Amino acid sequence: MSGPVANNIFRSSGVIAAAAGGLSWQTVVTASTLTAEAGNGYWINTTSNACAITLPSSAEAGDQIIFVDYARNWGTNSITLDSNGLNYQSQDDTYTVEYSTNGEVVNIVYADATVGWIPQDDDEVADATTAPPTQKAIFGYGTTSPFVSLTNLVSSSGVVASDTTGVGTNRSQLAAAGYGGDKAIFGYGMTGSAVSLTNLVGNNGVVAADVTGVGTARNYLAAAGYGVDKAIFGYGTTGSNVSMSNLVSNLGVVSADVTGVGTARWGLAAATYGTDKAIFGYGTTGSHVSLTNLVANTGVVSADVTGVGTARSVLSAARYGSTGQAIFGYGWTGSYISLTNLVANTGVVSANVTGVGTARNYLSSASYGGDKAIFGYGWTGSNLSMSNLVSNSGVVASDVTGVGTARRALAAAGYSTSA
């Protein structure tokens, strides 16, 4: 082709700008700053930090830039845009431009000096994927008087295996949760004094060596998965009741303490619900309570919700069902009890259901088989090794005995997406 290039729909000058389909997509940005150029698309990964983006200092009508939330994490670490002397939606560059929604795509086009950059799209892109369900479970640690570090794996059909010994520091009164989609983490507990160590569990059920120093040492806390592939530890006692939480990344890294999340208490339980959220419930402040605290899919813990079933402590909870229900079960009211409370996939806790297996406390539970749950072990005045399977409709079955070493004050979590 010869001759001059006429004005085109992308720019008012004779210089051709790339159309949307012809944007030059750059490598994933993980840095905390970026200088953007027109005609480019940027995948912005804010998993580790926020990102401050500087737009071009000069632009022509039709210049286009797209920013995409690569890791669906802008809700935790946002991006900000510095319009660098130009206007943005008719405002000068003294205004703050921030995007902080998970899964957001921001498509901006430059109009003119009056309006400046205009977002053509700034919508959240739905997460159409669904994580494969957890198939197996692991019970670990606890006390037989003395403390132990043994574990018992649970198959996708709910069969508990014989003991595996020697995985990390012996302790009890700890918590566990799934993370990373197919792995698990044990954390905190009591060795004679409260500890803050954790042990990661691979998707093959193998427990790794101790990792120390992750948040405030405490025991009688609870943990659950949230946000599809992350986890949260919450509450407990250091000798005094606490309401702090610690978030766990999808790589199993535990964050610093977050304080002030609902009523301080210990001896509570927690479970995932609704596929990507969590619920803490029950426990004791010195008196048994029935309150719950919901956890958003961003890991933010909500204010107390009161009056959900019988007040009790040292109970357990797990997720079940194909649409993300949960179940709280067993515990101590001053006597051993066997009642349960089902949790809808909206986080609403139902009235008591009684008479489900042997009344006991200091037990643990986890999801298995994609949509079922298992309660195991505990204490009735002596250590137990029994378990109770929970169907995908939340019905608890009769006792199954003889599953590994009898013990109490252990923890459990789901792992593996392979049956």
Image (spheres, rainbow, N blue to C red):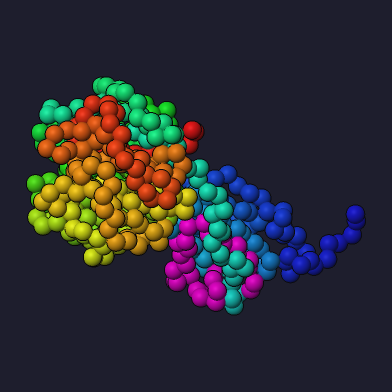
**311 in relation to 155, above or below:** below
> Could you tell me what secondary structure mostly forms the magenta stretch?
loop
Picture layout, residue 121 above or below residue 382 = below
At x 24% / y 31%, what residue is drawn?
385
In the image, residue 128 lies at what x, y percent?
57, 53
Q: Residue at x 46, y 42 (%)?
A: 370
Is residue 340 rendered magenta in the image?
no
Residue 317 locus on image (x, y percent):
30, 48
Name the one closer to the observer, 28 or 171: 171
Q: Nearer the viewer, residue 325 or 386?
A: 386
Can you say which quadrant of the picture contains the N terminus?
A: bottom right
Task: Say which residue appears at 13% left-offset and 34% top-offset.
Answer: 382
Q: Is residue 108 magenta?
A: yes
Image coords of residue 209 (percent x, y): 29, 26
Q: Is residue 113 left or right of residue 294?
A: right
**In the image, 389: left or right of 240?**
right
Q: Is residue 253 visible?
A: no
Range of residues picked out in magenta: 86-112
